[in-house]
Image (tube, helix red, strand yellow):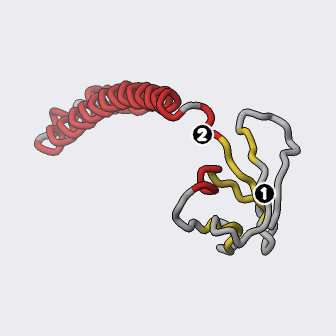
Amino acid sequence: MKRLSERISFLQGLGEGMNVMDNGPQGKLIVEMLDVMSDMVDYIDELRSEFEDFKIYVETIDNDLLDLEEDIYGADEDDRIEVICDNCGENVYFDAGCLDDDDVIEIICPKCNEVVYVNDGSFDFEPAIIDRDRETPEQPFASP
């Protein structure tokens, strides 16, 4: 924005140096247009500043909500299951809470749209529970 402001100031100075105002109605129009452009840059700068304040405010709210979520649901809810899609080989992760859900839930591979797990007992394996906090690259997995 600073560069734009500098360019408008340059044009205004150029207009004054050329005595554009003395050139009749066209000169007055050019001077007014440059003034409007200058006002627009000032307004955009103000909007940018307000946007940055708003962005910081939203990030603060997001962090507060994350803290609240951790307080309410606890850290144990971070368990997830990893299965490998037999069709395309994609690693698919889902919440471990799906295993205990009373409703039948199908987990679908996001890459090929094949069903990789259904919690109705038709998949005969015990999926490995993976803790998100672990940094080990080789995490256990199970495939149907």
Measured from the top left, where is residue 133 in percent x and y?
72, 33
Alpha carbon separation for disc pair 2 and 1: 18 Å
In the image: residue 5, left or right of residue 87: left
- Of all residues, the one furthest to the left in this rendering is 25
| Amino acid residing under circle 2 | Glu
Q: Residue at x 64, y 65 (%)?
A: 119
The mark nearer the N terminus, 2 or 1, is: 2
Residue 98 lies, with reference to residue 4, above or below; the image says below
Which of the 4 quarters of the picture holds residue 54?
A: top left
Measured from the top left, where is residue 96 in percent x and y?
65, 50
| Amino acid residing under circle 1 | Glu
Residue 119 lies, with reference to residue 95, above or below; the image says below
Q: Is residue 6 visible?
A: no
Q: Residue at x 84, y 45 (%)?
A: 139
Residue 135 lies, with reference to residue 83, above or below; the image says above
Judge by depth and name the residue closer to the eye, 54 or 48: 54
> For mark 2, what is the residue?
77
Which of the 4 quarters of the picture holds residue 124?
A: bottom right
In the image: residue 138, left or right of residue 83: right
Disc ID at residue 126 = 1
The nearer-to-camera label among 2 and 1 is: 1
Disc ID at residue 110 = none
Q: Residue at x 64, y 56 (%)?
A: 99
